[in-house]
Image (cartoon, helix red, strand yellow):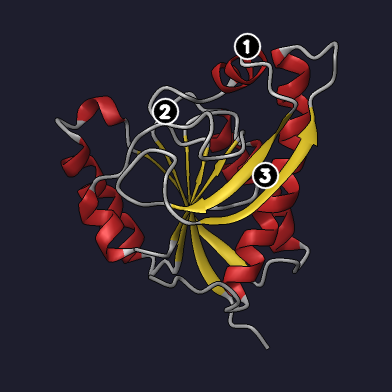
Amino acid sequence: MALMIRIAVLVSGSGTNLQSLIDNCKSGYIPGKIVLVISSNPKAFAIERAKRAKIPVIVLNRKRYKNDWTYSKRILKEVRKKDVDLICLAGFLWKLAPNIIKEYRGRIMNIHPALLPKFGGKGMYGLRVHKAVLKAGEKFSGATVHFVDEKYDHGPIIIQKKLKVRNNETPESLAKRVLKIEHKIYPLAVRLFALGRLKLQG
């Protein structure tokens, strides 16, 4: 029997991946509970999703902190308070500083809408990723769940799933198709973590 892990989800936008994690915790597919949602954006729709699910939400506007270090220090303070086992970044647009990475190494996950290491890095989020994929003439795209380290969209890959890029693909249609993959593989990665089936080696 798996222990119920305590999860914090960090968001900046509409929160569809947050919703997917909420639904999968509720159904029991993920043996865990989301105990905290932190939003960097006071207008993110993800806040509404968390409130509907009766999950505590904190808005920590990045613009009010002088650098990544002080911002991450505040996030760290909040996740410690809630005794969090796993931090999930779900459309979270800010880089976490080494202070939080060090304490939670192997316990911070991110989902990215491309097949890393391709099409990752600073500024590569949302439709920008899908535009870059199409511009490069890629035959395949997909999504990646990975553990977070000190670099953008870097760190050990947990799961990747790919799809074939269609001839008439637009960035919008690709985004929609990749999002469906994200909603499957992120809960799976969290489930594997909760069941103790992920190990970091080296």
Q: Earlier in the sequence, mark 1 or mark 3?
A: 3
Q: Is residue 190 left or right of residue 125?
A: right
Which residue has dot 2 on it? Answer: 41
Q: Is residue 103 left or right of residue 128?
A: left
Of residues 200 and 202, the one drawn nearer to the viewer in this rendering? 202
Of residues 87 and 150, the one drawn nearer to the viewer in this rendering? 150
Image depth: mark 1 or mark 2 in front: 1
What kind of residue is marked 1?
Lys
Of residues 47 and 179, the one drawn nearer to the viewer in this rendering? 179
What kind of residue is marked 2?
Asn
Residue in the image at 31% along x and 44% along y? 96
CB of mark 1 within 8 Å of CB of mark 2? no
Image depth: mark 1 or mark 3 in front: 1
Q: Earlier in the sequence, mark 1 or mark 2?
A: 2
How many numbered marks have been drawn onto this rendered protein structure? Answer: 3
Which secondary structure, mark 2? loop
What's the CA distance linking mark 2 and mark 3? 17 Å
Measuring from the top left, give residue 180's x and y in whole percent. 77, 38
Of residues 115 and 186, the one drawn nearer to the viewer in this rendering? 115
- The quarter of the picture where residue 58 lies is top left
Which secondary structure, mark 1? helix
Where is the N terminus found, in terms of image quarters? Answer: bottom right
What's the CA distance linking mark 1 and mark 3? 30 Å
Residue in the image at 51% along x and 25% along y? 125
Determine which of the numbered discs, if any, sits on residue 135 in the image.
Answer: 1
